Image: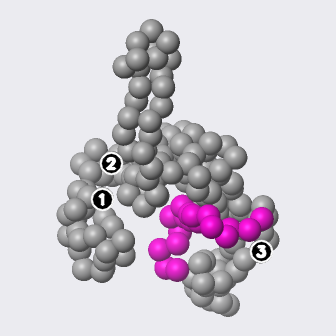
């Protein structure tokens, strides 16, 4: 969105304005614990799930359209002041989470569950792409190949999210 580093609690870097490195000591601590050699299952999956849900919250808060909320609460039957007003999400939008079935299964499910909770289950969809490494004769990775897809319809007018930690090189996304 063109915001400068630091606007959202980010670390400064030289990757350009489209990259965001979140400055969160607590999330960094958990990521470091995830990376530690002594960390084992099921803690690994629990950390991936938690970190992915936190990332989903940050992405949705920063990138998804907003709307004004003016809603009567359960307390409204007892007092006219029982109203919540503020800025929330625009629930008229649709979101599609694309699970790249390599390392993206748990992150994709965390994003899908979070978006379904925020926008409503009818506004979120999860699609699947099965991808695998392509190697040469020596075993060196030369790219990625799409092996199969399960796509649930159009992505027109939807926000498309790829919560895939293996997308770092970009070869999965350019296939």
**Residue 55 seen in the figure:** no
Q: Residues within 10 Å of mark 3 (few under 14, many from 20)?
A: few
Q: Eyeballing the image, is 140 above or below 24?
A: below
Q: Residue at x 59, y 78 (%)?
A: 173
For label 1, the residue is 22
Between 31 and 95, the one nearer to me in the picture? 95
Give the spatial CA distance, label 2 vs label 1.
9 Å
Q: What span is in magenta?
A: 153-170
Q: Residue at x 68, y 68 (%)?
A: 155
Q: Going from the N terminus, do you reach mark 2 or mark 1 first?
A: 1
Q: Secondary structure at mark 2?
A: helix
Give the spatial CA distance, label 3 vs label 2.
34 Å
Residue 85: image quadrant is top left
- Residue 121, image x and y in percent? 67, 43
Q: Going from the N terminus, do you reach mark 1 or mark 3 first?
A: 1
Circles 2 and 1: CB atoms closer than 8 Å: yes
Q: Is residue 137 magenta?
A: no
- Residue 58, image x and y in percent? 39, 52
Residue 147 is marked as 3
């Amino acid at each position: 969105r063109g915001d400068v580093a630091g606007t959202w609690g980010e670390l400064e870097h030289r990757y350009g304005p489209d990259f965001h490195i979140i400055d969160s000591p607590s999330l960094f601590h958990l990521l470091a614990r995830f990376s530690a050699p002594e960390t084992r299952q099921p803690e690994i999956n629990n950390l991936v799930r938690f970190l992915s849900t936190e990332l989903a919250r940050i992405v949705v808060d920063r990138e998804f359209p907003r709307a004004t909320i003016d809603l009567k609460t359960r307390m409204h039957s007892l007092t006219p002041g029982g109203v919540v007003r503020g800025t929330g999400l625009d629930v008229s939008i649709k979101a599609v989470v694309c699970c790249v079935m390599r390392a993206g299964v748990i992150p994709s499910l965390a994003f899908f569950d979070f978006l379904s909770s925020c926008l409503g289950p009818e506004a979120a969809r999860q699609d699947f792409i099965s991808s695998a490494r392509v190697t040469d004769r020596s075993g060196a990775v030369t790219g990625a190949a799409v092996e199969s897809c399960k796509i649930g319809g159009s992505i027109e007018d939807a926000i498309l999210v790829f919560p895939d930690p293996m997308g770092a090189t970009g070869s999965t996304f350019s296939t």
